[in-house]
Image (cartoon, grey):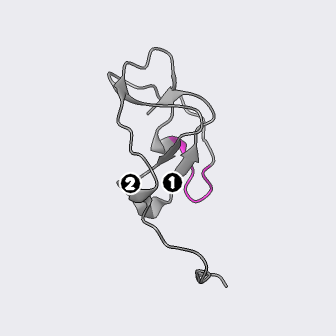
Amino acid sequence: MIGEIPSHWNAIKLKYKLQLINEKIVPNGLQYVGMENIESFTGKYVQSDIKAEGLANHFQAGDILFGKLRPYLAKAYQCKADGCR
């Protein structure tokens, strides 16, 4: 069954189910989560001392971050708190 899509499922492009948000803010102490903080294939958060410089994209708890520039790295993360990237 691996690699097969059950006949009762529908394959739908993500762009029809998700909303892309590009709200830029000044970070002001918010947690920074960059794609370098996300482990490939597992989605685990990896702590670092990197901080946002200048404007950064804002996200809220529950939002899903994913790397669209290099999708082959398979990086996705569901945010546990508000922050920026």
Q: Residue 40 colored magenta?
A: yes
Residue pictured at 43% horizontal, 20% vertical: 27
Task: Say if mark 2 contacts mark 1, CB within 8 Å.
Answer: no
Amino acid type of disc 1? Lys
Q: What element carries label 1?
A: loop
Question: Magenta region: which residues?
Answer: 37-43
Q: Which sits earlier in the primary sequence, circle 2 or circle 1?
A: 2
Find residue 48 and report its horizontal and vertical position in percent.
Answer: 55, 33
Q: In this view, does 27 lie to the left or right of 64?
A: left
Q: Is mark 2 on a helix, strand or loop?
A: loop
Q: Which of 37 and 3 is in front in this view?
A: 3
Amino acid type of disc 2? Lys
- Quadrant of the frame with the C terminus: top left
Query: Which residue is under mark 2?
Result: 68
Label 1 packing within 10 angstroms: few (<14), some (14-19), many (20+): many
Whole-angstrom CA distance, mark 2 to mark 1, is 9 Å
Query: Which residue is under mark 1?
Result: 75
